[in-house]
Amino acid sequence: MCDDVGIFEALKYAMLTCQSVNIGLNRRNQAEKIEGVVKKVYENHFHIALADEPLPFEHDATFPISEVEYVEYS
Protein backbone atom coordinates (compact mmCIF):
# COMPACT_ATOMS: atom_id res chain seq x y z
CA MET A 1 0.00 0.00 0.00
CA CYS A 2 1.12 3.57 -0.52
CA ASP A 3 3.22 5.24 2.16
CA ASP A 4 0.86 8.16 2.69
CA VAL A 5 -2.37 6.75 4.04
CA GLY A 6 -3.89 10.25 4.22
CA ILE A 7 -3.54 10.74 0.45
CA PHE A 8 -4.98 7.28 -0.19
CA GLU A 9 -7.96 8.00 2.08
CA ALA A 10 -8.53 11.44 0.49
CA LEU A 11 -8.62 9.88 -2.99
CA LYS A 12 -10.97 7.14 -1.75
CA TYR A 13 -13.30 9.74 -0.19
CA ALA A 14 -13.32 11.77 -3.42
CA MET A 15 -14.24 8.61 -5.34
CA LEU A 16 -17.05 7.62 -2.97
CA THR A 17 -18.59 11.11 -2.94
CA CYS A 18 -18.06 11.78 -6.69
CA GLN A 19 -16.60 15.19 -5.88
CA SER A 20 -14.53 17.10 -8.36
CA VAL A 21 -11.00 17.49 -7.02
CA ASN A 22 -7.79 19.37 -7.73
CA ILE A 23 -4.76 17.14 -7.33
CA GLY A 24 -1.19 18.35 -7.09
CA LEU A 25 1.33 15.95 -8.57
CA ASN A 26 5.10 15.78 -8.40
CA ARG A 27 6.00 14.14 -11.72
CA ARG A 28 9.70 13.75 -12.48
CA ASN A 29 10.42 16.67 -10.11
CA GLN A 30 7.95 18.89 -11.98
CA ALA A 31 4.83 20.27 -10.31
CA GLU A 32 1.62 19.47 -12.16
CA LYS A 33 -2.00 20.18 -11.25
CA ILE A 34 -4.93 18.12 -12.54
CA GLU A 35 -8.66 18.49 -11.99
CA GLY A 36 -11.38 15.90 -12.35
CA VAL A 37 -13.48 13.19 -10.74
CA VAL A 38 -11.72 10.17 -9.25
CA LYS A 39 -13.21 7.03 -10.80
CA LYS A 40 -11.28 4.23 -9.07
CA VAL A 41 -8.57 3.98 -6.43
CA TYR A 42 -6.25 0.97 -6.32
CA GLU A 43 -3.44 0.14 -3.93
CA ASN A 44 -0.76 2.04 -5.86
CA HIS A 45 -2.56 4.10 -8.53
CA PHE A 46 -5.86 5.79 -9.34
CA HIS A 47 -8.02 6.58 -12.37
CA ILE A 48 -9.46 10.06 -12.84
CA ALA A 49 -11.84 11.55 -15.42
CA LEU A 50 -10.06 14.77 -16.31
CA ALA A 51 -11.96 18.06 -16.40
CA ASP A 52 -9.93 19.45 -19.28
CA GLU A 53 -11.36 21.24 -22.29
CA PRO A 54 -12.85 20.92 -24.89
CA LEU A 55 -14.76 17.86 -23.61
CA PRO A 56 -14.70 17.88 -19.80
CA PHE A 57 -14.68 14.46 -18.11
CA GLU A 58 -14.37 12.62 -21.45
CA HIS A 59 -10.73 11.60 -20.92
CA ASP A 60 -9.55 9.23 -18.22
CA ALA A 61 -5.99 9.09 -16.97
CA THR A 62 -4.06 6.90 -14.54
CA PHE A 63 -1.50 8.21 -12.06
CA PRO A 64 0.59 6.58 -9.32
CA ILE A 65 -0.50 7.53 -5.81
CA SER A 66 3.17 8.06 -4.95
CA GLU A 67 3.19 11.17 -7.20
CA VAL A 68 0.30 12.87 -5.34
CA GLU A 69 1.32 15.85 -3.19
CA TYR A 70 -2.19 17.00 -2.19
CA VAL A 71 -5.91 16.48 -2.83
CA GLU A 72 -8.20 19.51 -2.70
CA TYR A 73 -11.97 19.08 -2.88
CA SER A 74 -13.83 21.49 -5.17
Image: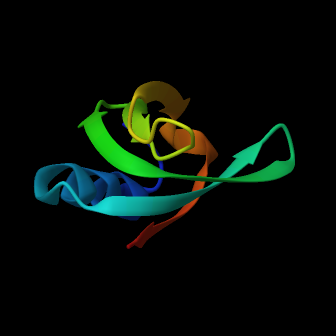
The C terminus: image quadrant: bottom left
Q: Residue furthest front?
A: 54
User: Which sits in the foreground, 35 or 41?
Assistant: 35
Left/right of residue 18 with respect to residue 68 in the rendered view: left
**Percent position (x, y) of residue 57?**
38, 38
Quadrant housing residue 41: top left
The answer to whether residue 38 is above or below residue 16 is above
Left/right of residue 17 with respect to residue 11 in the rendered view: left
Quadrant housing residue 52: top right
Left/right of residue 63 with respect to residue 14 in the rendered view: right
User: Which sits in the foreground, 61 or 51?
Assistant: 51
Residue at 33% in and 48% down: 37
The N terminus: image quadrant: top left
**Percent position (x, y) of residue 72?**
45, 71
Which scheme is used to colour this image of the protein? rainbow
Residue at 21% in and 49% down: 15
Left/right of residue 32 with respect to residue 73 in the rendered view: right
Q: Residue furthest left?
A: 16
The answer to whether residue 11 is above or below residue 54 is below
Residue at 49% in and 27% down: 61
The image shows a total of numbered marks equal to 0
**Percent position (x, y) of residue 17?**
13, 59
